Image (cartoon, rainbow, N blue to C red):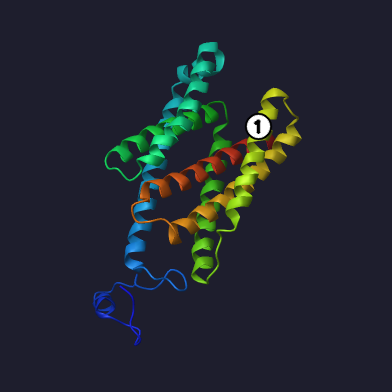
Amino acid sequence: MGRNDKGYDIESVWNIRHGDHNDEALYPMMLESPQLRWAFIRKVYAIISMQLLLTAAVAAAVVFYRPIPDFFVKTKLGLVAYIAIIIFTFILMIPLFYFHKRHPLNLFLLALFTIAIAFSVGLSCAYTKGRIILEAAILCCVVVVSLTLYTFWAVKRGWDFSFLGPFLFASLLVLMFFSLIQILFPLGKLTLMIYSAVASIIFCGYIIFDTDNMIKRHSYDDYIWAAVALYIDIINLFLTLLNLLKLSD
């Protein structure tokens, strides 16, 4: 409900009397209800939290049950299965996008997608020192929280980050092309460190961009897709930081 010329309305008076201070606009010229937008944001972060917990559980199972990573790393069938999981994850994003508003199918697809991602994270951590995994996780948490707070602060002051979209997408295409080159023609350690550092910066940009979209642009029914976007950003940031720390160890 919008405010009238005097700066208040019935809903605002009710909220003030009952201690609800979420009626303040998240950004200048906000036309929608701040309460509804805050409810949407809380829902998105609740979903992301559950995704991260599920990811940690599945990844831990993969890391600590050694036959799983040994099968994928040391056998040809395991390599084929790993490639199949990666392809399945990308394919799964198609129905997840088209049915992200259809409950409860969206939750089922989200769970499958999260488990597939978590499996890949577990394999990435399986042959990495525990100290490096912990350092990457802590650093990732600090960066994500800092960038999230910064984005909310900047948006509150009227900043807009939609201009980042084309640059981030182009940068992502370059990263994918570079990854293909790395597979065909393995590059040196220093080059990989630079690649990981640049990739980390790009995914930091994506966290700001997708947080800005969550605050301003996603409809209230887009909570699944908003959560997926930020979840992918966080996981990719963690993996690039993990690779960077592993190479520099």
Query: Which is more toward the observer, 127 or 224?
Result: 224
- Give residue 140's position: percent from left, percent from top: 54, 47
Query: Which is more toward the observer, 147 or 164?
Result: 164
- Give residue 192's position: percent from left, percent from top: 70, 35
- Give residue 186's position: percent from left, percent from top: 72, 25
Residue occupying image coordinates x 53% and y 30%? 125
Residue 53 in view: no
Residue occupying image coordinates x 55% and y 58%? 162
Neighbour tally class for label 1: few under 14, some 14-19, many 20 plus, Cα within 10 Å: some
| 213 in relation to 119, above or below | below
In the rendered view, does 224 fall on the left or right side of 139? left
Residue occupying image coordinates x 46% and y 16%? 67
Query: Which residue position is annotated with label 1?
Result: 179
Query: Which is more toward the observer, 150 or 181?
Result: 181
Residue occupying image coordinates x 58% and y 47%? 203
**Residue sitting farthest toward the top:** 76
Query: Which is more toward the observer, 248 or 11?
Result: 11
SS type, badge 1: helix
| 11 in relation to 61, above or below | below
